Image: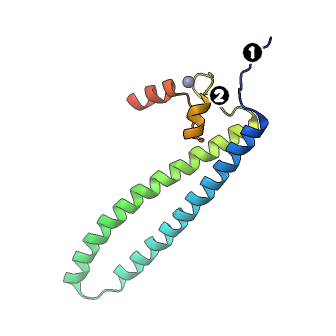
């Protein structure tokens, strides 16, 4: 009996890949929407001649823009994680922890298809 490193069937792998591709397309679409909205805000601010209004508007915009940027940042890192997971799928290392090389539980992958580390390693990284 040989040990099975990857407990995932080809069918399972294909399912994960489909989910990841869809998720990535969805995230990219929201990123694009955010980017075009950001440009609109910049244009509106530049054309306002009334200084008092412009100043308070700018303050509000900075605040909104800050939240947008944090969200954008989040989405970007998520897209990167999904890219990494898809790469692992293609290399046949999907479901294997990037850090310790141990298996990532299928239940974890079901919940978080772009997980590239096992729970133990993830928790250790987050505590740092
Ligand atoms: Zn690990």
Give the residue at x 64% y 41%.
85
Provide residue 55's location: percent of width, then percent of height.
Answer: 23, 77
Provide residue 106's location: percent of width, then percent of height.
Answer: 62, 31
**In the image, is 10 to the left or to the right of 43?**
right
Q: Quadrant of the C terminus?
A: top left
Provide residue 111's location: percent of width, then percent of height.
Answer: 55, 40
* Residue 48 higher or lower than 70, as above or below: below
Q: Which residue is mark 2?
A: 96
- At label 2, counting other C-alpha atoms closer than 10 Å, the crowd grade (few under 14, some 14-19, many 20 or more) is many
Give the residue at x 49% y 24%.
120
How many marks on residues?
Answer: 2
Under 8 Å from ligand 1: the CB of mark 1? Answer: no
* Residue 59 higher or lower than 44, as above or below: above
Q: Residue furthest top?
A: 1
Q: Quadrant of ligand 1?
A: top right
- At label 1, counting other C-alpha atoms closer than 10 Å, the crowd grade (few under 14, some 14-19, many 20 or more) is few
Q: Earlier in the sequence, mark 2 or mark 1?
A: 1
Residue 103's tag is: none
Q: Which residue is mark 1?
A: 3
- Front one among 54 and 104: 104
**In the image, is 11 to the left or to the right of 20?**
right
Give the residue at x 51% y 28%.
119
What kind of element bears circle 1?
Answer: loop
Cα–Cα gap, marks 2 and 1: 14 Å
């Amino acid at each position: 009996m040989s040990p099975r490193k990857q407990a995932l069937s080809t069918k399972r792998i294909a399912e994960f890949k489909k989910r990841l591709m869809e998720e990535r397309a969805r995230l990219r679409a929201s990123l694009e929407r955010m980017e075009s909205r950001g440009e609109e805000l910049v244009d509106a601010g530049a054309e306002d001649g009334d200084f008092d209004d412009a100043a308070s508007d700018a303050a509000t915009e900075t605040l909104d823009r800050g939240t947008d940027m944090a969200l954008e940042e989040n989405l970007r890192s998520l897209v990167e994680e999904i890219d990494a997971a898809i790469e692992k799928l293609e290399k046949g290392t999907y479901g294997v922890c990037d850090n310790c090389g141990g298996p990532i539980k299928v239940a974890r992958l079901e919940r978080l298809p772009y997980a590239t580390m096992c729970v133990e390693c993830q928790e250790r990284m987050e505590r740092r």
